[in-house]
Image (cartoon, rainbow, N blue to C red):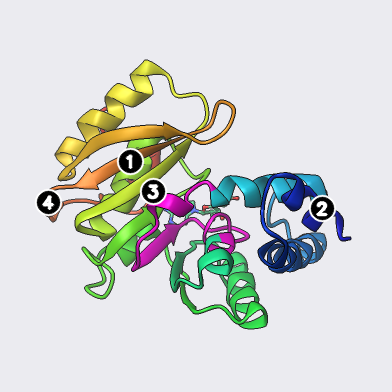
Amino acid sequence: MNPIEAALEGRGVGAPVAAALARYGRLVLEANTRLNLTAAKTPEEIAEHIADSLTLLPDLRPPYVDVGSGAGFPAIPLAIATGIEVTLIEATTKKARVLEELLGVLGLRGTVVPQRAEEAARDPRWRDHFLTGTCRAVATAAAVAELLLPLIAVDGVALLQRGRFAPSERASLEDAALVLGGAVEGERPAGGERRIVLVRKRTPTPARFPRRSGVPQRRPLCE
Ligand code: SAM
């Protein structure tokens, strides 16, 4: 058995889905030898990223957007596991191209938007559109809230995957969410120190957000 598949089955992923996810993992490892796509270099590390992506499954509702997809975590594992259509917003052109290829080769339904989230959020096709948004390993919690909430429809949720989560980062997120029309609704454990923080959009995000490209990450709100 392929080592990624074995590692996933060892984490409780069922056989047919584990095989499809392992195929994706092998493609990422292959592409990673040509391009610097992800820091994960071994089958075990790839399996860990895939397993971490799948912790989002219980909260996923379409339409679904992922910001800063990189090599496709968490959106591609979620698409493989559920068949859901995905919108991937990725600022780096070469990564966006690889994501297009991965969707095609794996036969997944989805769109790659080769832009920064700050620009995509000004596009009427995407603003206030999605019921679920994710943004893994991209920025601090408050910055992620500014990148995601403008894209989320009222009543939709931004799902923030966090590791260690200092009280000051939580306080900034709570304040930033309010400014952006959202509210932190709660969190649930996602293995070890990992957790998923749920930010619900309550009212439309004010038109001045997101601020211009680069600012949300350089100067996160309320930090
Ligand atoms: N989400 C993937 C993961 O968990 O492995 C990739 C994480 S990687 C560290 C961060 C990615 O976010 C990079 O591919 C980068 O190009 C992209 N990115 C950073 N800021 C962005 C923004 N404002 N809009 C869209 N993509 C962004």
SS for callout 3:
loop
Report if the beta carbon of the residue with label 4 is closer than 8 angstroms to ligand 1. no
Query: Which is more toward the observer, 104 or 155?
Result: 155
| Range covered by the magenta-colored residues | 55-77
Residue at 68%, 48% (x, y): give it: 12
Q: Is residue 62 a member of the stretch shown in magenta? A: yes
Residue 206 is marked as 4
Residues at marks 4 and 2 touching, judged by CB atoms closer than 8 Å: no
Residues at marks 1 and 4 touching, judged by CB atoms closer than 8 Å: no
Quadrant for residue 141, please give it.
top left
Q: Tell me: 83 left or right of 131.
A: right
Amino acid type at image mark 2: Ala
Q: Which residue is mark 2?
A: 6
Q: Which residue is mark 1?
A: 198
The mark closer to the camera, 3 or 2, is 2
Give coordinates of residue 118: x percent, y percent: 33, 57
Amino acid type at image mark 3: Gly
Disc 4 from disc 2: Cα separation: 47 Å
Q: Earlier in the sequence, mark 1 or mark 4?
A: 1
* Crowd around label 1: few <14 · some 14–19 · many ≥20 (10 Å): some
Residue 214 is marked as 3
Residue at 82%, 61% (x, y): give it: 33
Report if the beta carbon of the residue with label 2 is closer than 8 angstroms to ligand 1. no
Residues at marks 1 and 3 touching, judged by CB atoms closer than 8 Å: no
Q: Quadrant of the C terminus?
A: top left
SS for callout 1:
strand
